[in-house]
Amino acid sequence: MKKKAIYPGTFDPITYGHIDVIKKALKIFDQVIIAVSDSNNKNYLFEISERINLVKKAIFKDSKIKSNKVKVIAFKSLTTNLCKKYKSNIILRGLRAVSDFEYEFQLAGMNRKLNKSIETVFVMSDVENQIISSRFVKEIAELKGDIRKFTTKSTIKALKNKLL
């Protein structure tokens, strides 16, 4: 049986930190399902279809990750329900800094309460990617700063087009 991990997030936009977590996860799991959230409680810069497209371009085109090992989907449900649907008992979460840990710890605990068979696996991105957040990438792009160290070429192009 293939070991699958569900990597949920907003990916608004995807960054090198996300890609780093995905690459590391592919060393552990047979497949990573990148689940792009379409919840109503956030104000997204990119619509769900745009974020799905950006993730696919960043992963398959820019980062040249094999498409047979990664699946990109949209979701609007509990992550635990998504795990059930895709027959996975692993939720993958990226950690950047100690400040992420408290929120992630609480989220993992709630998911565990919802479904005892689901484990959350935390993967840290490399040191040079730990400071990157989608929010900061958007802010820097809005202020016409250089974001080449933070995200892929196709994402940079999409940000420039969106913010013009």
Image (tube, helix red, strand yellow):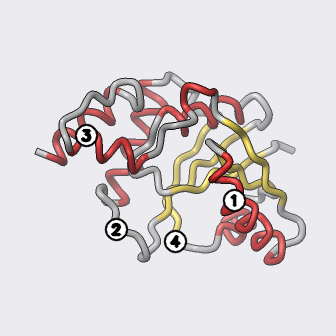
Q: Residues within 10 Å of mark 4 (few under 14, many from 20)?
A: few
Amino acid residing under circle 3: Ala
Q: Secondary structure at mark 3?
A: helix
Q: Earlier in the sequence, mark 2 or mark 3?
A: 2
**In the rendering, at what x and y percent does residue 16 appear?**
49, 32
Q: Which quarter of the figure has residue 66?
A: top right
Q: Residue at x 73, y 68 (%)?
A: 106
Position of the C terminus by quadrant: top left
Q: Mark 1 or mark 2: name the one nearer the start of the chain.
A: 2
C-alpha distance separating marks 1 and 2: 21 Å
Q: Looking at numbered disc 1 in the image, what kind of residue is underneath it?
A: Glu
Q: Which residue is mark 4?
A: 76
Q: For the residues marked 4 and 1, what is the alpha-carbon distance in whole angstroms?
A: 19 Å
Splitting the image into 4 quarters, where does residue 120 fall?
A: bottom right
Outermost left residue: 164
Report how many numbered discs are placed on residues in the image.
4
Q: Quadrant of residue 57?
A: top left
Mark 1 neighbour class, 10 Å CA radius: few under 14, some 14 to 19, many 20 or more: some
Residue at the (37%, 45%) spot, across then down: 53
Is disc 4 in contact with disc 2, using a CB cutoff of under 8 Å?
no
Mark 4 or mark 1: whose residue is earlier in sequence? 4
Pointer 4 or 2: first along the chain: 2
Of residues 160 and 53, which is closer to you in this image? 160
Crowd tier of the residue under label 2, counting other residues whose Cα lies within 10 Å: few below 14, some 14–19, many 20 or above: few
Q: CA distance from mark 3 to mark 4?
A: 28 Å
Secondary structure, mark 1, is helix
Please tell me the numbered disc located at residue 104. 1
For label 2, the residue is 43
